[in-house]
Amino acid sequence: MPREQATAFAPGRVNLIGEHTDYNRGLALPLAIAEGVTVRATAREGAQVEAEALDLGERDTFPLPAPSGLAGGWRAFVRGAAAELGRAGFPVGGARLQISGSIERGAGLSSSAALEVALCLALVGLSDREPPDRRELARICSRVENEWVGVRTGLLDQLASLYGRADAALRIDFRSLEVEPVPLELGEWRLVTLDSGDRRSLAASAYNERRRECARACELLGIASLREATPAMAARLPEPLADRARHVLEENSRVEQAVAALQRSELSELGRLLNASHLSLRDLYDVSTPAVESAVARLRAAGAAGARVIGGGFGGHVLGLLPPEASGPEGAREVRPGPGARLLER
């Protein structure tokens, strides 16, 4: 029978390596983190949802089915979650939602996916239905971001949030959607993030343009995704499409090299790969900013074996890998792999 209350938590993520590969059916190696979003849902009578973003002191109320049209900000995620769950066969009833988070928005740590996942788990948790398969739930959440928020993201953030492990990163193949845990044994080494100071809005950035460029490259090459391309094929493309394709191909290779480095406990090699990924994202994919470059330089000057821009780019946090002897720059915060999204009570 339906439940009166359901509380869900979904973590953010740090992508160790494999950036802008998900919507190109490539490879990535993310990890869920401890910080995330909590949604407390309480059933109410009537066909209406009342939502409150506690951290912002803002509210929203809308009828069911959720109305289409621009809502803006966090409200678009709430309305989109209700609508897309209904379209997927998980109709949403009247509910009061309280939303809180411990993850910084616009930092490249996937607060958006954490919000989508927590909303969907909490809303389904009020019903007498079992939640969708986690891959299907990731697709539902991605449609929320694509269709309601206007950002053409892939599935990396949602899958990382849903499949996170406390002791592992996740090798995700976006062609098969296979998720394989990769033990993340750092010993005295540390992964840290450092805020660049640039806040970003993916919908207002060049993120969607990068996705269109990749789609155009595929169209010109006559392939379904850049996963099918070869370096020789990429070289035939006009600029900047050739650079975009080259980044994707080389980044897929770096993911496999990073998995091998972790399996061999070769953390210095992992640092080298992080540096190579950043150079590619800066020079071939053009997603860095002066503030990001400054943050990367600060991490390297403080002894990081590797550092790179993470998330969609265009600002946010950068990731650094610190050896035991490095203390890191002021403001750097350690991140550790954490468990995936879950219902806290039903």
Image (cartoon, rainbow, N blue to C red):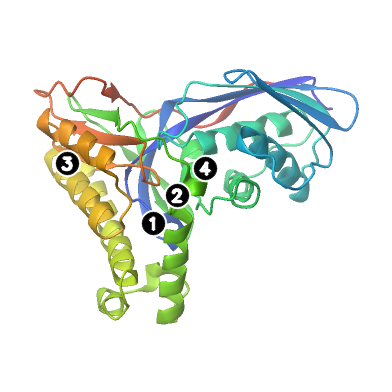
307 shown above or below 216? above
Coordinates of residue 95 in the picture (x, y in percent): 79, 26
Q: Residues within 10 Å of mark 3 (few under 14, many from 20)?
A: many
Disc on the earlier residue, 4 or 1: 1
Q: Secondary structure at mark 2?
A: loop
Question: Which sits earlier in the primary sequence, circle 2 or circle 1?
Answer: 1
Among the two numbered marks 2 and 4 on one chain, the one whose residue lies closer to the N terminus: 4
Give the side of residue 70 with respect to residue 289, left or right. Answer: right
Q: Residue placed at 29% from the left, 30% from the top?
A: 193
3D distance between C-alphas at marks 4 and 3: 25 Å
Residue at image mark 4: 158
Q: Quadrant of the N terminus?
A: top right
In this figure, which residue is indicated by the disc labeled 2?
A: 205
Residue 306 or residue 344, whichever sits in front? 306
What type is the residue that disc 1 sits on? Thr
Q: Residues within 10 Å of mark 4 (few under 14, many from 20)?
A: many
Cα distance between the residues tagged 2 and 3: 28 Å
Q: Amino acid at mark 4?
A: Gln
* Element assignment for label 1: loop
Instruction: Tell me which amino acid carries mark 2.
Output: Ser
**Whole-Å distance between the Cαs marked 4 and 1?**
14 Å
Mark number, residue 21:
1
Where is residue 123 shown, x and y percent of the image? 72, 32
- Please identify the quarter of the rendering in which residue 35 is found: top left
Q: Give the Cα distance between marks 2 and 1.
A: 18 Å
Q: Which residue is mark 3?
A: 271
The three-letter code of the residue at mark 3 reads Gly
